[in-house]
Image (cartoon, coloured by chain):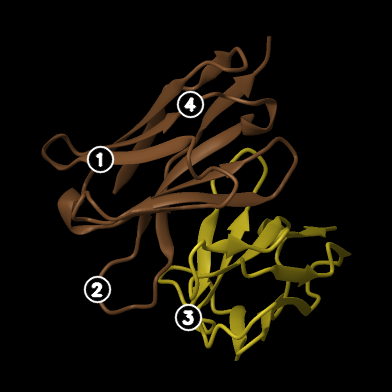
Chain colours: A yellow, B brown
Amino acid sequence: DIQMTQSPSSLSASVGDRVTITCRASQGISTYLNWYQQKPGKAPNILIYGASSLQSGVPSRFSGSGSGTDFTLTIGSLQPEDFATYFCQQTYYTPRTFGQGTKLEI
Amino acid sequence: VHLVESGGGVVQPGRSLRLSCAASGFNFRSYALHWVRQAPGKGLEWVAVIWSDAITTYYGDSVRGRLTISRDNPKNMLYLQINNLRADDTAVYYCARESGGAVPEHLDYWGQGTLVTVSS
């Protein structure tokens, strides 16, 4: 299976900060990489698909980049509602696999 | 788009359980559907997918052979049959719709989840 490794596992930041989360695939996955946000007790929510395409309705402060094995999710200026856990997911190989998550804390 | 899971609860090890996901607000028979689970305090684990043809299925390595995904297109229902339940099946189970059309695959709508607890 493709292993997806996120770093860091947790991150402390402040409102207004610029934050970057990375995701590394154990094999090349082109741009078949998605990012989800999950808040406690809620289902995940798609943010970015195809490595860099912003899901409709998602604020433009979220952006994604990368291809092959290395990807990044950037939040341009943290807002209070952005404190959550973020997961990457590859959709190039079956089984689909998720990263272990990055918890973004105040 | 609305996805509502049901069927979770407390189940003894070794027993079986069928989860359901009722879908509405979209052309159900045109979309692939997934199950994703999340153990308490843990990350997301992809479980299975069933294509719109209701025939093609794929499973995660840890569940293959014990779990069966199925769908009833006329009833707009998705199912997950879990046999020989184990403690490590304890999780919130989410159903999710796969994006359609020409966009890269992603899970664009999720249900609220149903909790399965395996305990004697």
**Residue pointed to by mark 2:** B101
Type of amino acid under label 4:
Asn
Dot 2 alpha-carbon crowd within 10 angstroms: few under 14, some 14 to 19, many 20 or more: few
Can you tell which quarter of the image residue B71 is in? top left
Is the residue at mark 4 from the same chain as the one at mark 3? no
| Spatial CA span between label 4 and label 2 | 34 Å
Q: Nearer the viewer, mark 4 or mark 3?
A: 4
Query: Where residue B95 appears, x then y in whole percent?
Result: 42, 43
Q: Chain of mark 2?
A: B
Helix, strand or loop status at disc 2 = loop
Dot 4 alpha-carbon crowd within 10 angstroms: few under 14, some 14 to 19, many 20 or more: some
**Residue pointed to by mark 1:** B71
Q: Chain of mark 3?
A: A
| Spatial CA span between label 4 and label 3 | 35 Å
Above or below, comparing residue A79 to residue A43 in the picture: below
Q: Earlier in the sequence, mark 4 or mark 2?
A: 4
Q: Chain of mark 4?
A: B
Type of amino acid under label 3:
Gly
Q: Nearer the viewer, mark 1 or mark 4?
A: 4
Q: Nearer the viewer, mark 1 or mark 3?
A: 1
Type of amino acid under label 1:
Arg
**Residue pointed to by mark 3:** A50
Helix, strand or loop status at disc 4 = loop
